[in-house]
Image (cartoon, helix red, strand yellow):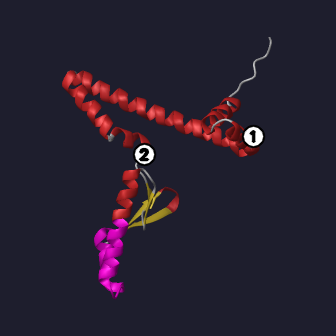
Amino acid sequence: MAETFRFPHGYDVRVLRKKDVLDSIDDNIIDKDIALEIVKCCEIDATNFLKEGRWAGIPFVGNIRIPKHVQTLISDETKALFADAKENLDENTYLLFRKSYAKEIKKKESNERFYKYTVSMFVGKNQKFFRLISKNTSDAYARFLCYTLRTLDIVSDE
């Protein structure tokens, strides 16, 4: 059965299980085969979106996505790196390596998000300038210039 969970600030959230959805399909839908195909299609689409790192909308749940740092940690390159490290390092050093690598990936992703946010704030207020620089040079240079101008600090002569 569906359970209702009480969250802070008075929010009541009803959590439906897969059996509840299937029972609802049995009770309310005449052509059950088509409805089950739609559910299967939604499951496949959500799985594909999550594998690609995109947002996936799931009915009665909301939007979900695998965080970028987790995607990096479960990628094939990282798995190969960890396998090589496990062969060459002892157990304690290997665990420290994995932990420090995960922290480094998280920090890199955080810095990248801050960079994109800072650039978007500058571009939002100076769209003509950004388009002009991007048109004359490259998009990457225009973004770097916008980031530099946004984070520029004025130094006094004192």
Q: Position of residue 44 (x, y in %)?
A: 34, 63
The residue that mark 1 highlights is 129
Of 1 and 43, which appears nearest the observer?
43
In the figure, residue 50 lies in which quadrant?
A: bottom left
Q: Would residue 50 appear left or right of 127 to someone viewing this image?
A: left
Q: Residue at x 30, y 40 (%)?
A: 76
Of 23 and 67, which appears nearest the observer?
67
Image quarter of the C terminus: top right
Q: In the current view of this chain or complex, which residue is farthest to the top?
A: 158
The residue that mark 2 highlights is 67
Q: Position of residue 51 (x, y in %)?
A: 36, 52
Q: Residue at x 21, y 22 (%)?
A: 88
Give the mark nearer the N terminus: 2 vs 1: 2
Residue 2 is at least partly visible in this image: no
Q: Amino acid at mark 1?
A: Phe
Span of residues in magenta? 16-43
